[in-house]
Image: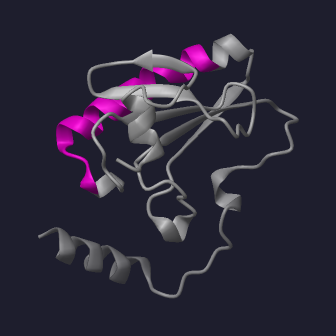
Amino acid sequence: MSCIFCKIVAGEIPAEVVAREPEVTAFLDVEPLADGHVLVVPRAHAACVEDLTPAAAAALFRTVVRLAGPVREALGAAGTTIGVSNGEATGQTIPHVHVHIVPRWPDDGATNVHAILPRRTSRPLADVGAAIRRVLT
């Protein structure tokens, strides 16, 4: 097993674990963007969100919901940014699904999710919607 998150889940690498559940483990990021930056990972390896089973996805996001408030409260934060980078092209550096919970404060110098990418669209919304619906069927 070479996945660092799988090694953390298995207890082979120490981590500051904040929650351990049957299907999910949550621990502090060792390169935090802010105090209290938590990573929530499925215990079973899955590289991308679409690789998760429905049960694993439900357990993962149930834990994110359960932790968001306590992380905010424990750090005295005004809010949290919750995010997932899904695939190498998005900057995902560890190919194991993980959800970031990052405590935020009004003057922390960070911005919102819309600032991640410049707005670059070229197709009408109806065409994009139709393309997605075709793949879903």
Q: Position of residue 96 (x, y in %)?
A: 40, 49
92 w.r.t. 29: above or below: below
User: Residue, x 22% and y 71% (percent of image)?
Assistant: 133
100 w.r.t. 136: above or below: above
**Closest to the observer, 35 or 71:** 35
For the image, the number of numbered tags is 0
**Closest to the observer, 130 or 112:** 112
User: Residue, x 54% and y 65% (percent of image)?
Assistant: 90
Residue 117 forms part of the magenta stretch: no
35 w.r.t. 49: above or below: above
**Closest to the observer, 128 or 8:** 8
Colour scheme used in the picture?
Answer: one colour
User: Residue, x 66% and y 35% (percent of image)?
Assistant: 30
Q: Position of residue 87 (x, y in %)?
A: 44, 64
Q: Position of residue 126 (x, y in %)?
A: 35, 78
Q: Residue furthest bottom?
A: 122
| Residue 76 quadrant | top right
Q: Position of residue 59 (x, y in %)?
A: 29, 29
Q: Which residues are magenta?
A: 51-71
48 w.r.t. 110: above or below: below
Q: In the shown orientation, is residue 76 left or right of residue 19? A: right
Residue 60 forms part of the magenta stretch: yes
Quadrant in the picture for the C terminus: bottom left
Does the magenta stretch mainly form a helix, a strand or a loop?
Answer: helix
